[in-house]
Image (tube, grey):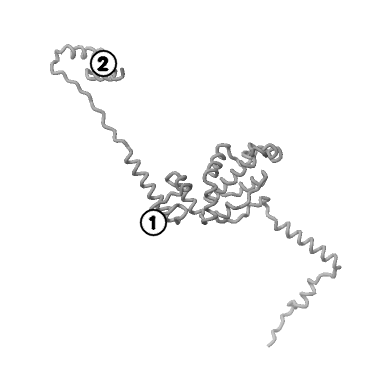
Amino acid sequence: MSSRRKKGQATFKSFQSTVAEKPVQEESTEALREEQVEAVKKFAAPAMSNPYQSLPAVGLSRVLSKRLPEDMEGIIQYYNHIDTIQATSFVEKCRILAHANEVFRDADTKEAFQQEQGSWKSFLNRIGMSHPQVNRFISFWNVFGPTILDKAIQQDFSASKLAELLTWPEDPKVALLEERKYKINDGEFTVYEMTREQLREVKKMLNERKEQNLIDATPVLPKPARVHVDFSDKNDPLYQTLKKRAQDQGMKPDQIIRAALEQYLRT
């Protein structure tokens, strides 16, 4: 059963006739195509010139194995893309700043590098950090960086585990560098061998032990003894002398004695 076309409704033939392009020569068609391709590329280009701006979130091992830029602009762009809230990014920030310190201040190349790229002070101004602030990140990387890098790549040490270790109750050198084993219900493990839940369990235990040690170490101060002197013989010459001196100084006799004892102990 064929459907009837409504009056005035466009047919496929009539649609073809309205959009048909005028015949053009082959060279003109190719030129038009290239122009369209360039227009699409320009339109699709990101507004930000920072090549690191659209980097996806990746595991700790991939972050730490990324190749670092060797010029000032590249280092600044890399630094600016880092989200400092994440534990992964904290270590990444330590790494890029330690790398920047190395390329800017290497004894053999710093003069030529800074003459071409700019000074270390200029770099700090551009990232909005002071020298002491940057030094803390550099120190962390110099102490823990190589070990964290090795463990992240070799043992798949995750960012979530690292987040727990950044607030470790004990000296982190013992846990991260000396690889101390902690006893839990499932056995004895290093921090690299534990799951995140096990790390939290150990952290809780260490915090409780730390609080208990503080309580145990708090000294109990004895109450100061009160000195009270009483003379049974009110006519005693010493009592009369103390009484007179106390009256002259507006004090009690026992206060006079206490002052005399304190003076004696100081001499």
Quarter occupied by residue 34: bottom right
Number of residues whose C-alpha sits closer than 10 Å to that of mark 2, classed few (under 14), some (14–19) or many (20 or more) = few
Helix or strand or loop: what does disc 2 sit on? loop
Task: Please name the amino acid that badge 2 sits on.
Answer: Gly
Which residue lies at the image location 37% right of the left edge and 44% below the top edge?
210
Does residue 19 appear to the left or right of 107 in the view shown?
right
Q: Quadrant of the C terminus?
A: top left
Q: Position of residue 85 (x, y in %)?
A: 53, 49
Label number found at residue 44 = none
Q: Which residue is farthest bottom? A: 1
Which residue lies at the image location 64% right of the left edge and 46% below the top edge?
75
Mark 2 = which residue?
Answer: 250
Q: Quadrant of the N terminus?
A: bottom right
* Mark pair 2, 1: CA separation: 72 Å
Q: Position of residue 72 (x, y in %)?
A: 66, 43
Mark 1 = which residue?
Answer: 187
Task: Please name the amino acid that badge 1 sits on.
Answer: Gly
The mark closer to the camera, 2 or 1, is: 1
Which residue lies at the image location 14% right of the left edge and 15% below the top edge?
234
Pick the residue in front: 176 or 80: 176
Does residue 220 appear to the left or right of 166 in the view shown?
left
Residue 86 visible (yes or no): no
Which residue lies at the image location 41% right of the left edge and 50% below the top edge?
203
Q: Position of residue 215 (x, y in %)?
A: 33, 41
Q: Which residue is farthest left? A: 233
Residue 201 visible (yes or no): yes
Number of residues whose C-alpha sits closer than 10 Å to that of mark 1, classed few (under 14), some (14–19) or many (20 or more) = few
